Image: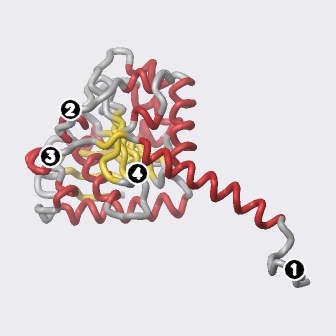
């Protein structure tokens, strides 16, 4: 049955009272993005450190755009948003891939991305970005810093969580219930399309396995010419027991290649 408009030409007010809070909530989330401090970046430094997706002067940026599109399709289909990025061992280029993927995502105006440096033993994203403004990830994960005060804005739709304080108790921090609570609050407050967590190498320690309950899926970066088939199988079997493996990325010198 059709509703009869009231004298003001509006339907009965229930619909309006539902829309207003939703709009207010959405505006509040956008305000948090605006509150983040702007991170000063240098284009020459980004080019030197192979942040290909930032300047797009290297044709390899197209490979990251392909990774971006395929990943976002999977996330949209599954209604997921939290992605771990790891590798079997050190030196495979996982931080390189995570950073370039985040910058590629940021070129989509409707895609809000958070990039987090969760390699607490050996943080590297700040160095790649040439960032002088950094913070202490451990303090953030322990609830001592609000997300809007910790995250730094690269673009209007990309913020990064940097770290300049390595720690040898990474596994314990990553498995703490407070860490889970802090990340949930961050997700609820910023409502990102995707959160990319740059994690340590999976075979080095228990950091990655301990953190997997906080993600929806994992990308594995294999180093071209260095990662063995045995290492790949071991990582897939180990991580696949706990969370979906979204894909295997072969990081070669010329461009990354997505595999499933």
Q: Is residue 49 above or below residue 71?
A: above
Place of residue 194 in the rendered image (x, y in percent of width and height, measured from the top left): 45, 51
Place of residue 34 in the rendered image (x, y in percent of width and height, measured from the top left): 43, 48
Q: Camera-side residue: 63 or 147?
A: 147
Sooner in the amino-acid sequence: mark 3 or mark 4: 3
Q: Is residue 108 above or below residue 173?
A: below
Sooner in the amino-acid sequence: mark 4 or mark 2: 4
Q: Which residue is mark 4?
A: 113
Q: Secondary structure at mark 3?
A: loop
Q: Is residue 9 above or below residue 227?
A: below
Q: Camera-side residue: 97 or 191?
A: 191
Q: Which residue is mark 3?
A: 42
Q: Which residue is mark 2?
A: 132
Sooner in the amino-acid sequence: mark 3 or mark 2: 3
Q: Quadrant of the C terminus?
A: bottom left
Q: Camera-side residue: 257 or 187?
A: 187
Q: Secondary structure at mark 1?
A: loop
User: Does the rendering let one see residue 108?
Assistant: yes
């Amino acid at each position: 049955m059709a509703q009869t408009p009231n004298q003001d030409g509006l339907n009965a007010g229930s619909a309006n009272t539902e829309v207003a809070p939703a709009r207010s909530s959405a505006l509040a989330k956008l305000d948090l993005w605006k509150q983040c401090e702007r991170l000063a970046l240098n284009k020459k430094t980004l080019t030197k450190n192979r942040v290909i997706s930032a300047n797009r002067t290297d044709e390899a940026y197209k490979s990251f755009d392909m990774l971006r599109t395929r990943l976002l399709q999977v996330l949209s289909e599954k209604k997921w948003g939290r992605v771990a990025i790891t590798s079997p061992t050190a030196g495979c280029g996982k931080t390189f891939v995570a950073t370039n993927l985040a910058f590629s995502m940021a070129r989509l105006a409707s895609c809000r991305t958070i990039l987090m440096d969760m390699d607490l033993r050996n943080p590297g994203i700040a160095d790649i970005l040439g960032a002088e403004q950094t913070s202490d990830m451990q303090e953030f994960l322990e609830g001592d810093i609000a997300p809007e005060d910790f995250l730094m804005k690269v673009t209007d739709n990309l913020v990064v969580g940097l770290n300049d304080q390595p720690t040898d108790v990474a596994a314990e921090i990553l498995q703490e219930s407070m860490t889970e609570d802090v990340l949930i609050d961050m997700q609820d407050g910023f409502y990102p399309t995707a959160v990319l967590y740059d994690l340590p190498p999976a075979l080095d320690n228990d950091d990655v396995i301990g953190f997997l309950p906080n993600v929806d899926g994992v990308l594995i970066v294999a180093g071209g010419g260095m990662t063995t088939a045995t290492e790949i199988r071991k990582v897939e079997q180990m991580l696949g027991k706990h969370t979906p493996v979204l894909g295997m990325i072969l990081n070669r010198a010329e461009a990354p290649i997505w595999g499933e």
